[in-house]
Amino acid sequence: MKKVALAAAVSLAATSAFAGGLDEPIVEPEIIVEDTGTAGGWLVPVLLLVLLGAAVAAAD
């Protein structure tokens, strides 16, 4: 009998927790990162040219 009373008490406690109904889900805003700079487009080739020039100068 104690198990039945305990089960009834637990089921009542569980249903009262959800008595408010469903809330709308919280959706995280989508973060969009836009590449506004063009530094990466010319920086790597310039560094390669500098390294190539240094290697040619060191070879002479």
Image (cartoon, rainbow, N blue to C red):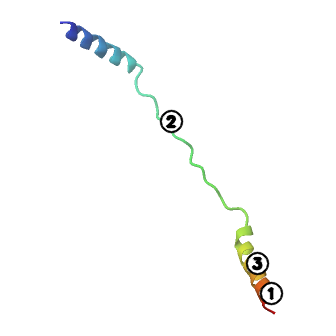
- Place of residue 59 in the rendered image (x, y in percent of width and height, measured from the top left): 78, 90
Q: What's the amino acid at mark 3?
A: Val
Helix, strand or loop at mark 1: helix
Q: Mark 1 — residue?
A: 58
Helix, strand or loop at mark 3: helix
| On screen, residue 48 above or below 22 | below
Q: Work out whether mark 3 precedes mark 2 in sequence or the reverse, and give the earlier one.
A: 2
Q: Mark 3 — residue?
A: 46
Q: What's the amino acid at mark 2?
A: Ile
Which dot marks residue 17?
none
Q: What's the amino acid at mark 1?
A: Ala
Does the CB distance between marks 1 and 3 fall below 8 Å? no
- Place of residue 1 in the rendered image (x, y in percent of width and height, measured from the top left): 18, 6
- Place of residue 37 in the rendered image (x, y in percent of width and height, measured from the top left): 73, 64
**Near-viewer residue (9 or 60):** 60
Residue located farthest toward the left when viewing the structure as drawn: 1
Left or right of 45: which side holds 11?
left
Helix, strand or loop at mark 2: loop
Looking at the rendered structure, the number of numbered marks drawn on it comes to 3
Of circles 1 and 3, which is in front?
A: 1
**Near-viewer residue (17 or 3):** 3
